[in-house]
Amino acid sequence: MKTTTALTGTIALAAGTSLGSITVSQGASGTTYSTELNFDEMGGPTGPGIATDAWASLGLASMAAGDGNNFVGDNASLFGPWIGTGNSFFGNFGIFMNFDTDLTNFSAQVWDPSGPPSLFGGGLGIFAFNDGTEVANVIVEPSWGGVGDEWIDISADGGMVFDEIRLVGFGFDPTTFADNMSWNAVPAPSGAAIFGLTGLVAARRRRA
């Protein structure tokens, strides 16, 4: 398992101050998180020209290929059996994902022919953002042709979160494939919690 701890920062929490980090890992196997997307779901979209918001019901607000030509299908039958089983997402010039809520974890199988990173190009860039600010930036040698580790994992701790992921190949022919995605989202505040906070603020104003 190759692990790189990307940008770290100090996050102010209710209980004080904690050092948080975003860790990007690449390995031969992956972790499955609470929300799953394997592109084989019953009634799921397949073929070319899929809408970027096709998986909005899962909290994935948009997913797009770098050139806008979103495709889901049996890419293993087209390129090689080493691209998993069943359907996968294919994106020329990268895969770009935006989520409705903050995430603490993300995992996926990824393939790309960009080769090892070097001073002259190559490699697969794994970028994570939160509210438009980059919080992780790692370049790895992607799996291709049945060679190399195909699983990536992005995990946050210490109060760090992310809501956008970009997978971008820097090779001569950057064609990125992804499958078996899963993630953990930060739960949104419940209505009761919001109501209680509103009541507390109102009470303090009355006392003032």
Image: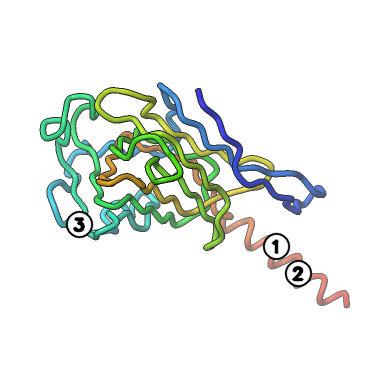
Mark 3 or mark 2, which has the lower sequence index? 3
- Which residue type carries mark 2? Val
Would residue 156 appear left or right of 61 to someone viewing this image?
right
Q: Residues within 10 Å of mark 3 (few under 14, many from 20)?
A: some
- At horizontal 34% and vertical 35% (from top left) the residue drawn is 115
Q: Residues within 10 Å of mark 2 (few under 14, many from 20)?
A: few
Mark 3 vs mark 2, foreground winner is: 3
Q: Position of residue 208 (x, y in %)?
A: 88, 78
Which of the 4 quarters of the picture holds residue 90? top left
Q: Decide: is 146 above or below 10.
A: above
| Residue where numbered disc 2 is placed | 201
Q: Secondary structure at mark 1?
A: helix
Q: Position of residue 180 (x, y in %)?
A: 32, 34
Q: Position of residue 163 (x, y in %)?
A: 49, 54
| Residue where numbered disc 1 is placed | 197
CB under 8 Å between discs 1 and 2 = yes
Which of the 4 quarters of the picture holds residue 148? top left
- At horizontal 54% and vertical 54% (from top left) the residue drawn is 188
- At horizontal 52% and vertical 55% (from top left) the residue drawn is 129
- Which residue type carries mark 1? Leu
Quote the CA–CA distance across marks 1 and 3: 45 Å
| Residue where numbered disc 3 is placed | 69
Would residue 160 appear left or right of 41 to someone viewing this image?
right
Q: Decide: is 6 above or below 190.
A: above
